Image (cartoon, rainbow, N blue to C red):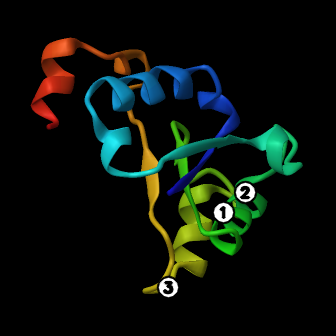
Amino acid sequence: MNFLVDHNLRGHSVILAGCLAASGWLDLISIRFVLFEEVGLADTSDDHVVWHYAQAHQMILITANRSMKGENSLEQVMREANTPTSLPVVTIARIDRLHCRARLSGALR
């Protein structure tokens, strides 16, 4: 399973990957976090481009920015282009609370 990591979560993806590894999820399923630069997307790419790229390449987009501001906002793109076969978008609402605790990761097993 490939996750396209929005530019605003670049450093946090390391924490998330560590939490998944510590809790044993990576023993069960192959998960890869892909950064914008690895696939040729600019940090300034608008949400329309990013969402369509993720869908076209069978990637789940992970972001902390899902606003409704503007016609190319992620929420607007999803409302207009989402289909029953579209992959989900994972939105982390409180990025400041993304950390790994041993007791929490153990509960995920």
**Residue at screen point 70% across, 74% down:** 56
Q: Amino acid at mark 2?
A: Val
Residue 62 in sight: yes
How far separated are the C-alphas under marks 1 and 3? 14 Å
Where is mark 3, residue-wise?
83
At mark 3, the secondary structure is loop
Where is mark 2, residue-wise?
50
**Residue at screen point 10% across, 30% down:** 107
Q: Is residue 57 left or right of residue 60?
A: right
Residue 71 position by quadrant: bottom right
How far separated are the C-alphas under marks 2 and 1? 6 Å
Crowd class of label 1 (few under 14; some 14 to 19; many from 20; radius 10 Å): many
Is residue 80 positioned above or below 35 on the image?
A: below
Q: Is residue 48 left or right of residue 93?
A: right
Where is mark 1, residue-wise?
54
Residue 26 position by quadrant: top left
At mark 1, the secondary structure is helix
How far from the left and from the top, in percent, is residue 32? 56, 45
Q: Amino acid at mark 1?
A: Ala
Crowd class of label 2 (few under 14; some 14 to 19; many from 20; radius 10 Å): many
Asked whether disc 1 touches disc 3, contact meaning CB atoms under 8 Å apart, the reply is no
Is residue 85 positioned above or below 43 on the image?
A: below
Q: Quadrant of the C terminus?
A: top left
